[in-house]
Image: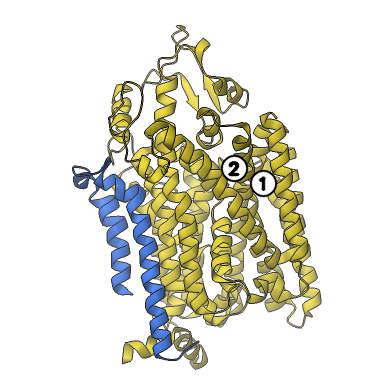
Chain colours: A yellow, B blue
């Protein structure tokens, strides 16, 4: 069987599985729709969080991005995992203890204000749409490459699948399909990674092979990373493991981006809501642990894949005559993800800095990896299914928070307080359907490439949610005026900075940036503005009512008592 | 919790970013040490931190009879 037949088979089988699970776990209550009836075991929730969280960007683009960035790729590695520490220690157990259905609901109740609720719901919708565009695009890319259909048809097929299980199954359907999707995506990521690690370093565990020695060729016996640094020197590029050298990001920028991504992770509504689905605060803590374990499995493998792919790419293509390039080069050339422009007309590929003739899209590093490592056709097909699982699971999680923000926070809590649960459930399904169509539109004509779009969603989440949630839990005196001022100024500042430097002046360089911080890292500054304004404004406004202060104390039990004793 | 958050800060920002250049002078197997922290070590530390926190809170919960 050829690659395409395998791909159709595996993708169809996984889709059938997702739909089957959705049918089995379909819901009839609002609690089932929003928070899966709060009966999800910690391990299952950890897996679901992993799939919810690991998007098309993590699966398809991240290893490739790291491969081009070398050391600097740590912004994604640390940035997208470190947030779970904040989530587990500062947010998840407390939000779960408070209960209810959404994060905006906590914000609305804690800050005793429908305006705060509305701002929070609007931030949720805005952040989630930014994020979902990237997922839909990822679905389209996978379909177009592996199944040879147009990107927009790929997006439409993806939308139909998500529509089916998100609208029908709500959070319960999403949770259990995400568990299945996690399994598909992790297997699809680890098999090629282990194979390529074994091939290059003789060690099938990528995390160890990464620090091992090269097995064959001129560099045999040399540590992989030393060999890679040597290849980079040969190409006159900065060394792979070197930090903050010219041509790489500065220390302050790396710090700001890592911080924005970490804090953004902890403030992402679709991640936070996953912790509402477990039984107790205790289960929320353990499922945060499981989530990071499951995520860490991919995140510690990805940098290894990045290094292997980089070595492979340079050693097979640099100084190779175009007529002798391997088979996979030709097949990916047709997708436009890799291209050779023979500037000096000698028919030989030159990758050195200044004379580079090869253009490579970062997505290729994961998608083409099995072909580069000469693995069997079914592994290639599995990678396609894995990419789809990663994108669809995240898209579904996002759709659900958009639907809950509209139907529950804006609809039930603000506009129609006496709406019956049946009508609310219907409204939730209708909004999910509308959101899916809007997401499809963004996926077909997206702003920028997948990982970057997603990186901005973090900045926006970091600068809006995280500060008001932390202050809401750990201070009794932050007022509604403080919270609203903080949230809206944080997200406006970050959004304006991103729009200014991405759309209005995309040619601007590091000298033009505020403190040398790029638009991806500006969420860290937005967050500080949010914290500062919320605290200052709270000092000058009327303190929150007693019952709110009481509520804050209760959420923090039994920590309070432990601290007093 | 303050201790855990300090370890979080040290393992990611101090070892992985601020001190990466001096640490890269040392080797951990085939890895420059600073690079290892940035690409691998910090993630392992994060997992251990949450584990310690979840276990500690379980003990506290039991001591005060919550849940």
Residue at 73% x, 75% y: name it.
Answer: A30
Q: How many residues crowd mark 2 within 10 Å: few (<14), some (14–19), many (20+)? A: some
Read off the chain for label 1: A
Of all residues, the one furthest to the top in this rendering is A346
Residue at 49% x, 25% y: name it.
Answer: A359
Residue A358, image x, y percentages: 47, 21
Q: Quadrant of residue A511?
A: top left
Residue A31, image x, y percentages: 69, 76
Q: Is residue A551 left or right of residue B14?
A: right
User: Label 1, label 2: how many angstroms apart (C-alpha)?
Assistant: 8 Å
Q: Which mark is residue A442?
A: 1
Q: Is residue A156 left or right of residue A532?
A: right
Residue at 65% x, 43% y: name it.
Answer: A139
| Quadrant of the drawing holding the C terminus of chain A | bottom left
A414 or A189: nearer the viewer:
A189
Q: Is residue A488 left or right of residue A535?
A: right
Read off the chain for label 2: A
Q: How many marks?
A: 2
Residue at 68% x, 78% y: name it.
Answer: A413
| Quadrant of the drawing holding the N terminus of chain A | top right
Q: How many residues crowd mark 1 within 10 Å: few (<14), some (14–19), many (20+)? A: many
Residue A241, image x, y percentages: 30, 38
Q: Which residue is mark 2?
A: A447
Residue A278, placed above or below residue A127:
below
Q: Quadrant of residue A312?
A: top left
Circle 1/circle 2 CB separation < 8 Å: yes
Task: Evaluate whether residue A19 shows in this view.
Answer: yes
Q: Quadrant of residue A223?
A: top left
């Amino acid at each position: 069987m050829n690659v395409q037949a395998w791909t159709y088979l595996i993708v169809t089988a996984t889709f059938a599985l997702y739909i089957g699970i959705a049918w089995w776990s379909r819901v009839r209550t609002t609690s089932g729709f929003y928070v899966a009836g709060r009966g999800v075991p910690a391990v299952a929730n950890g897996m679901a969080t992993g799939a919810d969280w690991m998007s098309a960007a993590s699966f398809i683009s991240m290893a490739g991005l790291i491969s081009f960035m070398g050391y600097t790729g740590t912004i994604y590695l640390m940035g997208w995992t470190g947030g779970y520490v904040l989530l587990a220690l500062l947010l998840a157990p407390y939000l779960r203890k408070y209960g209810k259905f959404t994060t905006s609901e906590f914000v609305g109740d804690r800050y005793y204000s429908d305006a705060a609720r509305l701002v929070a719901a609007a931030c949720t919708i805005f952040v989630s749409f930014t994020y979902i565009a990237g997922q839909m695009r990822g679905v389209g890319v996978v379909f177009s490459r592996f199944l040879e259909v147009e990107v927009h048809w790929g997006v439409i097929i993806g939308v139909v699948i998500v529509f089916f299980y998100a609208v029908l199954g709500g959070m319960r359907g999403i949770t259990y399909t995400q568990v299945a999707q996690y399994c598909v995506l992790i297997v699809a990521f680890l098999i090629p990674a282990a194979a390529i690690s074994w091939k290059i370093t003789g060690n099938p565990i990528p995390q160890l092979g990464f620090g091992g020695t090269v097995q064959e060729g001129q560099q045999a016996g040399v540590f992989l990373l030393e060999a890679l640094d040597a290849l980079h020197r040969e190409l006159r590029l900065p060394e792979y493991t070197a930090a903050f050298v010219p041509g790489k990001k500065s220390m302050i920028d790396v710090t700001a981006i890592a911080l924005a991504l970490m804090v953004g992770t902890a403030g992402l509504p679709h991640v936070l809501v996953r912790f509402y689905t477990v039984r107790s605060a205790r289960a929320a803590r353990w499922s945060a642990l499981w989530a990071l374990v499951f995520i860490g499995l991919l995140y510690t493998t990805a940098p290894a894949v990045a290094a292997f792919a980089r070595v492979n790419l340079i050693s097979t293509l640099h100084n190779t005559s175009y007529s002798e390039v391997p088979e996979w080069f030709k097949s990916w050339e047709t997708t436009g993800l890799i291209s050779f422009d023979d500037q000096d007309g000698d028919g030989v590929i030159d990758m050195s800095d200044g004379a580079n003739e090869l253009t490579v899209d970062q997505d290729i590093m994961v998608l083409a990896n099995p072909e580069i490592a000469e693995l069997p056709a079914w592994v290639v097909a599995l990678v396609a299914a894995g990419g789809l699982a990663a994108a669809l699971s995240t898209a579904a999680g996002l759709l659900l928070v958009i639907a809950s923000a509209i139907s529950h926070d804006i609809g039930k809590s603000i506009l129609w307080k006496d709406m019956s649960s049946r009508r609310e459930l219907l409204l939730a399904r209708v909004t999910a359907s509308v959101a899916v169509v809007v997401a499809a539109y963004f996926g077909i004509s997206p702003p920028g490439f997948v990982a970057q779009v997603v990186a901005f969603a973090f900045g926006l989440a970091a600068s809006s949610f995280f500060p008001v949630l932390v202050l809401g839990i750990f201070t009794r005196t932050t007022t509604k005026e403080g919270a609203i001022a903080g949230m809206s100024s944080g997200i406006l500042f970050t959004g304006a900075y991103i729009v200014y430097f991405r759309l209005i002046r995309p040619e601007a360089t590091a000298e033009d940036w505020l403190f040398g911080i790029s638009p991806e890292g500006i969420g860290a500054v937005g967050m500080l503005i949010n914290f500062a304004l919320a605290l200052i404004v709270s000092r000058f406004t009327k303190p929150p009512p007693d019952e709110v202060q009481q509520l804050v104390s209760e959420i923090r039990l039994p920590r309070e008592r432990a601290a007093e004793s | 919790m303050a201790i855990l958050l300090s370890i979080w800060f040290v393992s990611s920002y101090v070892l992985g970013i601020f001190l990466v250049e001096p640490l890269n002078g040392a080797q951990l197997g085939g890895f420059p040490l600073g690079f290892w922290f940035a690409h691998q070590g910090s993630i392992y530390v994060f997992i251990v931190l949450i584990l310690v926190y979840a276990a500690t809170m379980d003990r506290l919960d039991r001591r005060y009879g919550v849940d």
